[in-house]
Amino acid sequence: MEEIRYAHPKADHIGRKMIGEDNERALIYGESYVSKAVGSLGSSLRAKVPVYLEGNIVGVVSVGFLADNIQSISRNYNHQLWLVLVLITGFAILGAVIIAAYIKKVLFGMEPEEISHLLFQKETILQSTHEGIVALNPNGMITMMNSAAQRLLFDKQLASDYYIGKMIQEVSPIVHLSELLTDVNGLSDKEMVIGKNIVFVNTVPIYFEQTFMGTVSTFRNKTEIELLTKELTRVKLYADALRAQTHEFSNKLYMILGSLQLGKKEEVIDYIQKESNLQKNWIRVLIGKVSDPLVSGILLGKLNQANESGIELTIHPDSVLKNNVSEKKGEALLTGIGNLIDNAMDAVKMKPTSNRKISIFFTDIGDEIIFEIEDSGVGIHIDLVRKIFEQGYSSKAGMNRGFGLALTKRQIAEVGGALYLEESELGGACFVISIPKDM
């Protein structure tokens, strides 16, 4: 325990006392440790471990490295360490550039702020769109649904993300809706009844790198489309009536001008008085028998249009319409009158001039408003009585036909009325409109 050396790198140091005075912890307390001290060879970093013999400390083993050697080794390893760090940093920068370029490509070159703004704009556009929009993945899971789609499909509006992540067949009671909306071939203007609404469904498949990713479906309320169609029909009816009246009076003015140039003043005066009396008689009859100005207007327009076409259109002397109806019933009545008179004119145009006749009778005696419009055309074959009211069917040639009667029947039915066909005393068809009065 006198700290005498039994081994040393230098033979002349063996047998001498250790220098450094850092053996106390190992010799007295039995600790193993590392210390820094100045020994016989200079400043060094030394590890001390006690030596035991039969449980007693009899000595210490000290292994040391000179501080100069440690610094030299450290300097040698520093060069390698810096080289490795530079290589790692280079590879990290190269990897970051490649990853950034890939992310840019995936995100179409947009920055994070641009992506957030685009997402906000997309969500705003989707929720403000009047048409219902639903996006599904290939399994039929809802990935997006706007508020209009919620109102059309479920007749209620919940949080925008309420249906996200749910299967369409789980949340919708409509049979086969999932199969229709996930059709890889898509749909175009398929008519469906959803709750109380009749909608047109369009489905477009989504492909990414030739992989089917899902579908986007839009829902348009057919009722709203029909309302627009009705408005356009009314405008067309008024425009046709004005055109017919303008054309008729233009022809009459030319006839008057020619007669005056030929010096036939008396004949001109007689003609003007006759035409004036005819117009006054029409107006007087309509003012006296019809209280609704819109109904009077369309009847007067059709009288002029028929007169121009060489068709004898008459109003039954017992006709009367004194009750006004609601706006919705009025729209249905106007649509029906216009379409049926137009159809009657088309039906009699192929007849000889002497047999081009249309008769109109209307009354509001009783609980209903009745309009009868009959013509001297070829009539409707008994096998076609039901078919003529189907949408898309028409006996006329040409495209975009077969909507007038179907639209008229549906619109009249919506206000509680009916449209049916009877035999005409004139030999053609007789259509009857029946609309209940406002109570």
Image: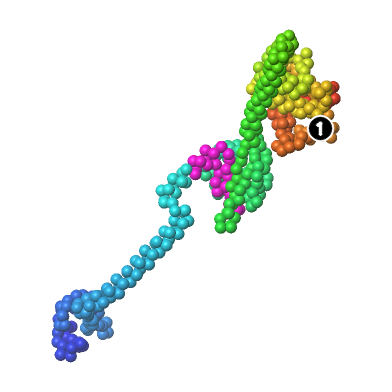
Where's the N terminus, which quadrant?
bottom left
Please state the extent of the stretch shown in magenta in the rendering.
Answer: 122-146
Vertical side of 138 occupied by 366: above or below: above
Task: Indicate whether residue 128 is drawn in magenta.
Answer: yes
Say few, some or many: other residues with alpha carbon within 10 Å of mark 1 (under 14 / 14 to 19 / 20 or more).
few
Vertical side of 276 occupied by 34: above or below: below
Q: Is residue 275 left or right of residue 153?
A: right
| The one of 81 and 357 positioned closer to us in this rendering | 357
**Percent x, y for residue 183?**
65, 50
Residue sitting farthest toward the bottom: 11
**Percent x, y for residue 367?**
74, 18
Asked which quadrant contains residue 420, the reply is top right
Residue at coordinates 62% horizontally, 36% vertically from top-left? 221
**Percent x, y for residue 230?**
65, 29
Residue at coordinates 72% horizontally, 14% vertically from top-left? 262
Vertical side of 4 occupied by 25: above or below: above
Residue at coordinates 22% horizontally, 84% vertically from top-left? 58
Colour scheme of the picture:
rainbow
Secondary element at tag 1: loop
Q: Which residue in the protein does label 1 denote?
A: 385
Q: Is residue 273 left or right of residue 163?
A: right
Task: Indicate whether residue 346 is drawn in magenta.
Answer: no
Of the residues shown, which amino acid type is indicated by label 1?
Answer: Val
**Can residue 92 be seen?**
yes
**Percent x, y for residue 194?**
65, 39
Q: Is residue 47 left or right of residue 184?
A: left
| The one of 196 and 364 positioned closer to us in this rendering | 364
| The one of 55 and 340 positioned closer to us in this rendering | 340
**Can residue 413 be seen?**
no
